Amino acid sequence: MVWSILADIDIYYAVHDIKPEDVGLSNRLQKIFSAQDAAKGHLMEDGVKGSPIVTYTTIYKFSKFSHSFCYSFVQLCLFFLPATAVIPLHNHPEMTVFSKLLLGTMHIKSYDLVDPVSSHDSPPHSQPRFARLVADNNFTAPCDTSVLYPTTGGNIHEFTAITTCEVLDVLKPPYSKADDRDCSHYEEFPFSAFSKNSVNTEEGECYRWLEEIEVSENSQMDEIEYLGPHIDDK
């Protein structure tokens, strides 16, 4: 893969063209994962349960300059989720994220805040935020690249692996506590939990309250070294 000009449109099509083997996931490994999913299904039927750990690796980090532009710092990450693993509801403050499901079937639920504010002006953590449901569906690879923006596109989302999954994310810019882009986690509540009034909605729209919470220990992810094909920065 050659990343020449890091404008949004170029990133979108570059991510769209990536296949599992481009990041080191061979056909043989994909068959092994499918066999493991089948075996795990039998274990679940027998009442054996666990808490699968999500693993991630950073493929590359870079910033790119042209004669007239300085593009944002960009990070490429790969997430590996065993079947039944969950990346809980979390946000992407002031970020644009390009995602592509490379392997497996995953349930994605996502929200946008109705009254988005800058991370510098965020309300107290204990104050619930009103949010509109953007997606609540299963997705199976191969599928199109999805894009979330700072205030639209499902900026707050949750991943649940139906089968073993691999997801590629391009974060522009990546998380940074120093720059007020720390990741926050949320718990969702029905509209009636915090309001007795009705809400005017468009047909088919669904609203929830999201309350920021501390991330639980079983939501932590393990980082590993990237050993896949080299990513060129030209």
Image: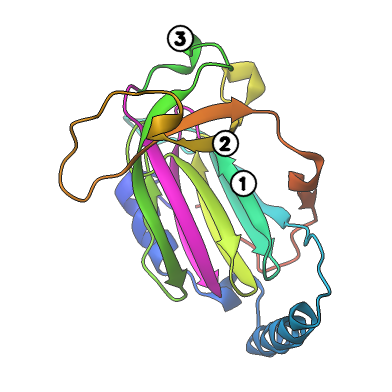
Would residue 94 be counted in the magenta stretch?
yes
Would residue 136 be counted in the magenta stretch?
no
In the figure, 157 relative to 104: above or below? above
Name which residue type carries label 1. Answer: Pro
Name which residue type carries label 2. Answer: Glu
Q: Which mark is residue 121?
A: 3
Name which residue type carries label 3. Answer: Asp
Precedes in sequence: disc 3 or disc 2:
3
Question: What residue do we see at 37% from left, 36% from top?
Answer: 112
Q: Is residue 39 left or right of residue 84?
A: right
Question: What residue do we see at 74% from left, 59% from top?
Answer: 226
Query: Residue 30 at x, y = what percent?
Result: 65, 84
In front: label 3 or label 2: 2
In the figure, 135 relative to 33: above or below? above
Precedes in sequence: disc 1 or disc 3:
1
Residue that badge 2 annotates = 187
**Mark 2 → mark 1, Cα distance in angstroms:** 9 Å
Q: Is residue 211 left or right of residue 56?
A: left
Can I make out residue 3 in this image? no
